[in-house]
Image: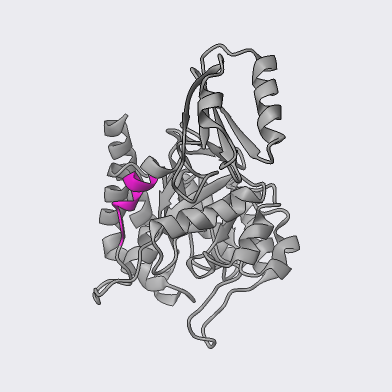
């Protein structure tokens, strides 16, 4: 249930109403906008008399929320969420370019790529220290030493970085990480999601390989209901019957998610296609679709990459793409 207050309500009257609703056993999510305040009521609202609440002088309207997700619901939070990570703002009109290799391989590699993407205008660096791999024989990342190399790249370039957490047991290692990524395979790891709800860091939540948008939003709800509302969503392609691309990029998810939720939505065309030559077209399409940012894999030597070289752009290719993305953004403003 949401309660919309009239414009100009005094803080005392708002506080009294919130206290009364809390005494009914409800959690109250407050969204203060420029022209109105929205109170999101979370919990068993069956005992709330809608007519009584709506009759109050300070209340403009009362509505039932039928969707199972509450905290990430745009009805609860009409204005776009702006997430800040290492001084970079994402969402609410702030477009972020995240770029870097699939996995951290060496100090030379990650620093070189970081410098290259920074020169092309990237806002954040991506790089996997812990990698979930389909085969147990594939390179699964450097682990904790990889995190230290990402910190070196950050110190060299000033780029905050995004990296994936796979196991709750490794959470302490991520104390100095700028953005924690939850990968597609962990989207419904509810124990991990609950724990990230207690972390004071932005979370980048990727859509699962075969998950619906509602399931993605419910996973975001796990994090937010546990206390961390700094969540960003990422569309990275889903598994379909197609056998020519790695996944199928669901670009319709961008406007649909923006209609359903106030959370920033980014697009990863690298994992979606799995083919480097297709990444620029899909990145531009995602930008035109209204995404709040792009997450693109860039490697200085893709042929010899230890992970996902086939979908990685070279630095010069990324530079050309970044210029085109900026051109589209200018046309959209």
Q: Is residue 313 visible?
A: no
**What sort of colour scheme is used for the picture?**
one colour
| Residue at screen point 32% across, 36% down | 329
Is residue 278 shown above or below 264?
below
| Residue at screen point 69% across, 67% down | 168
| Residue at screen point 71% across, 28% down | 19
| Residue at screen point 58% across, 60% down | 163
Image mark count: 0
* Relative image position of residue 214 (x, y in whole percent): 42, 56
Q: Is residue 193 visible?
A: yes
In the rendered structure, does residue 330 fall within the stretch colored magenta?
no
In the rendered structure, does residue 256 fall within the stretch colored magenta?
yes
Closest to the observer, 61 or 49: 49
Closest to the observer, 67 or 181: 67
* Relative image position of residue 129 (x, y in whole percent): 61, 68
Report whether 210 appears left or right of 188. Answer: left
- The residues colored magenta run 249-257
Quarter of the image for the C terminus: give it: top left
Is residue 135 shown above or below 192?
below
Closest to the observer, 182 or 260: 260
Furthest residue toward bottom: 137
* Relative image position of residue 300 (x, y in whole percent): 45, 64
Furthest residue toward right: 172
* Relative image position of residue 317 (x, y in whole percent): 33, 56
């Amino acid at each position: 249930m949401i309660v919309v207050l009239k414009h100009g309500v005094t803080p005392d009257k708002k506080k009294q109403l919130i206290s009364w609703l809390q005494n009914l056993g409800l959690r109250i999510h407050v969204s203060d906008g420029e022209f109105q305040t929205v109170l999101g009521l979370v919990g068993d609202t069956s005992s709330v008399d809608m007519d009584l609440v709506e009759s109050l002088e300070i209340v403009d309207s009362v509505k039932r929320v039928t969707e199972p997700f509450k905290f990430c619901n745009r009805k609860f939070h009409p204005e776009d969420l702006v997430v800040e990570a290492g001084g970079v703002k994402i969402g609410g009109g702030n477009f972020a370019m995240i770029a870097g290799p699939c996995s951290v391989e060496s100090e030379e590699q990650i620093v070189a790529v970081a410098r290259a993407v920074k020169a092309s205008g990237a806002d954040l660096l991506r790089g996997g220290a812990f990698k979930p791999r389909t085969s147990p024989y594939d390179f699964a990342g450097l682990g904790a030493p990889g995190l230290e190399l990402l910190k070196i790249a950050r110190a060299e370039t000033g780029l905050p970085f995004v990296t994936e957490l796979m196991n709750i047991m490794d959470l302490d290692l991520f104390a100095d990480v700028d953005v924690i990524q939850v990968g597609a395979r962990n989207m419904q790891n509810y124990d991990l999601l609950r724990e990230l709800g207690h972390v004071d860091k932005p979370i980048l939540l990727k859509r699962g390989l075969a998950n619906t948008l509602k399931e993605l939003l419910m996973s975001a709800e796990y994090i937010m209901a546990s206390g961390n509302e700094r969540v960003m969503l990422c569309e990275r392609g889903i598994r379909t019957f197609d056998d020519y691309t790695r996944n199928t990029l669901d670009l319709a998810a961008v406007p649909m998610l923006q209609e359903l939720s106030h959370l920033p939505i980014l697009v990863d065309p690298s994992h979606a296609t799995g083919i480097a030559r297709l990444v620029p077209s899909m990145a531009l399409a995602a930008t035109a679709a209204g995404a709040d940012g792009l997450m693109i894999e860039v490697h200085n030597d893709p042929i010899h990459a230890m992970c996902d070289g086939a979908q990685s752009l070279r630095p010069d290719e990324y530079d050309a793409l970044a210029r085109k993305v900026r051109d589209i953004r200018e046309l959209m403003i």
